[in-house]
Amino acid sequence: MRKIVLFSLFICSILFTQSTFALLSMELTRGVAGAIPIAVVPFSVEGMPPQNVSAIIANDLKNSGRFKVQANKQGVDNIVVGQIQQTSPNHYEVSFKLLDAFKSKGAGEQSAAISKKFEVSGDQLRQLSHHISDLVYQQILGVRGVFSTRLAYILVQHLQGAPTRYVLEVCDQDGYAPRPLLTSTDPIMSPSWSPNGKQIAYVSFENKRAGIYIQDVGNGSRRLLSQFPGINGAPAWSPDGRKLALVLSKGGTPNIYIMNMASHQLTQITNDFYINTEPSWSPNGKSLVFTSNRGGHYPQIYQINLTNKAVTRVTYEGNYNARASFTPDGNHIVVLNRNSDTFNIGILDLDAGTFRVLTNSGVDSESPSSAPNGSMVLYGTLSGGRNVLGMSATDGSVQILLPARQGEVQDPAWSPFLS
């Protein structure tokens, strides 16, 4: 993994490790001790649906770390039941209920906290399964689920006798259905989702020049947004999607700019001789956090007020902090933190000033990205000598690995809610 994240933006020859295209799969490595028992009873099925809906729901809830999932409905208060009926070739009617043992209609009949019916095609069954998981999660926990969201990351493939291949790829939140958006023999880095989830901004070094591109996730169309002389890097969308923060060195040193997406007009935000990079917007759009070496040799996180340009330092824990981004509540930032010689993911409470390490993996971590409901943080880490994706609850209680079975992934970014 690239340890010196601050300076990785400026190196045209980016170091990656060997990888191959692979399907990702979740592995829950730590769950909440007080996980809520829930039964996901195998759905009754008429026909031959291409997806096992109840199994996908069970895996979603289990891998959230918040539920203890079983197939038997005995002895639990929350029960998911359902049925699937094939109505025509490749079309299915799916109905499900979330039963609540505490609410009874009498004669032992349980009341349904949720009861819904859907009609979908076969290729929509996995997406529907995630939607059902979201409904169950929100009903029980009172927080919107993220099972229908997606992940973006960079996959790298070294082929014998061929140039290294870099792939911008997206997949479902559980690692399934990976889809390449761009394949190139030039390095790709720093994917950033638009607030509506329809576009991704990223850096590509095509023709040995850094450029920022915007790509449509749906149809794959792409356009060059910025290719000034020198550095073009670290794109970050504003919360309203109308602006893009980026790093340019066209004035000599790397500084942060904001581009109006409609007019392409640039506004310079930092203007000094320090290295200023990795901007990230606050949820209200009034400030940016960014990485800078202005406090000394090692990078720290600073916040700039976009109205008066006042800059304040926000990280003091450890000798290295970088890659900061806000959680959706705007009260915390997640960062790549080094204390001694170990890189881990940490979270800083901006109001209280308290810092907590989330991962404590003892190995390198990188690129933290918050889930849109604020419950989890996605990041890159090492497992078994390979670069993989990891997730941790923002309270540190849940940890998950998404190992690529035959490859390595990095530079992850969690999508916003997609509906």
Image: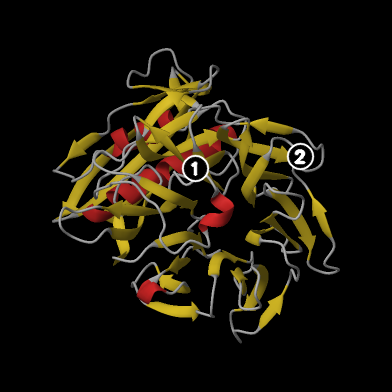
Identity of the residue drawn at 48% across and 61% down: 11
* Of 92 and 264, the residue lying toward us: 264
Q: Position of residue 246 (x, y in %)?
A: 60, 69
Q: Position of residue 245 (x, y in %)?
A: 63, 68
Measured Cα–Cα span from mark 1 to mark 2: 21 Å
Identity of the residue drawn at 60% across and 43% down: 374
Pointer 1: what residue? Answer: 379
Identity of the residue drawn at 14% across and 43% down: 47
Would you say 288 lies left or right of 381 here?
right
- Where disc 2 sits, the SS reads loop
Vertical placement of residue 282 versus 336, above or below: below
Pointer 2: what residue? Answer: 316
Q: Position of residue 94 (x, y in %)?
A: 30, 45
* Residue 416 seen in the current view: no
Q: Residues within 10 Å of mark 1 (few under 14, many from 20)?
A: many
Would you say 48 lies left or right of 372 here?
left
- Residue projecting furthest to the top: 75
Identity of the residue drawn at 68% across and 31% down: 356
Q: Indicate which disc, 1 or 2, sits on the residue closer to the N terminus.
A: 2
Check residue 343 in the rendering and tell me which mark sits there, or answer none.
Answer: none
Would you say 159 lies left or right of 227 here?
left
Q: Where is the N terminus found, in terms of image quarters?
A: top left
- Where disc 1 sits, the SS reads strand
Total numbered circles: 2
* Residue 239 seen in the current view: yes
Q: Quadrant of residue 351?
A: top right
Q: Residues within 10 Å of mark 2 (few under 14, many from 20)?
A: few
Vertical placement of residue 396 versus 126, above or below: above
Q: Which mark is nearer the camera, 1 or 2?
A: 2
Amino acid at dot 1: Tyr
Amino acid at dot 2: Tyr
- Residue projecting furthest to the front: 297
